[in-house]
Image: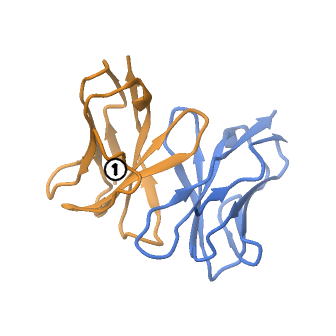
Amino acid sequence: NAGVMQNPRHLVRRRGQEARLRCSPMKGHSHVYWYRQLPEEGLKFMVYLQKENIIDESGMPKERFSAEFPKEGPSILRIQQVVRGDSAAYFCASARQGTNTEAFFGQGTRLTVV
Amino acid sequence: GESVGLHLPTLSVQEGDNSIINCAYSNSASDYFIWYKQESGKGPQFIIDIRSNMDKRQGQRVTVLLNKTVKHLSLQIAATQPGDSAVYFCAENPSGNTPLVFGKGTRLSVIA
């Protein structure tokens, strides 16, 4: 049973370009969470999705950031017109249920904006 | 706002000794807690969890203690090994359909 798969592992973008981060949850998991982590800091919640629905996006910037989790395929975190401050590690976690259950993380995508 | 915090940012332990990593949480409604281990360049790895109806839970070489009275959580690692060196995060799940809230983390360094 494969774990949470994120790709790419490393992504370099120039300022103004778009970044697309993908997350395939564990088999049987329909809940996906995206977190952002700066060096030497904790994980900051961004968005919580179920299949085809955004449940909570309170941690996601209102502009340039969007997320989806379609019926088929991986969850996508999209950052438009990236700026240097978007450089961070972005982690995805999946869970079988939405609350009070184990959430498993992927290896993350490290975004560098140059 | 609600937050999860850690008492010690760094902890150095001699190999073979026991390690204790502490965590304070502020949301008294939280009813589920998880400890994660994160090695350099990797994603957080699930270690152990505990629900609020329990005070203690044991795994392989790890024990989590929950004190709801003072809103304190601890992770005990027995016979600490060099492979235990990592950053450890506690996370709480406030009641309702809410995501995990993470603390800042404690870096554990094991001295051989």
Percent position of residue A2, x then y: 34, 50
| Mark 1 residue element | loop
In the displayed structure, A100 sits above or below B105; it is below
Residue furthest to the bottom in view is B53
Whether residue B111 sits left or right of residue A1 in the image: it is: right
Q: Which colour scheme is used?
A: by chain
Tell me the crowding category of disc 1: few under 14, some 14 to 19, or many 20 or more residues within 10 angstroms, Cα based: few
- Residue A107 in the figure: left or right of residue B34: left
Count the marks: how many?
Answer: 1
Q: Which residue is drawn at 59% across and 67% down?
A: B33
Which quarter of the rendering shows the N terminus of chain B? Answer: bottom right
Q: Give the image location of residue A70, x and y in percent.
A: 17, 55
Q: Which chain carries label 1?
A: A
Residue A58 placement (x, y as % from top left)? 39, 57
Task: Report the side of A44 relative to B81 (left or right).
Answer: left
Q: In this view, does A20 lie to the left or right of A12?
A: left
Rendered hue of chain A is: orange
Which quadrant is home to the C terminus of chain B? top right
Image coords of residue B81 (percent x, y) = 74, 42
Q: Mark 1 points at which residue?
A: A2
Quarter of the rendering containing residue B3: bottom right
Is B111 above or below relative to B59? above
Chain letter tied to blue: B
Identify the residue at image location x=28%, y=38%. Answer: A64
Can you say whether A76 is above or below A80 in the image?
below
Tag 1: residue type? Ala
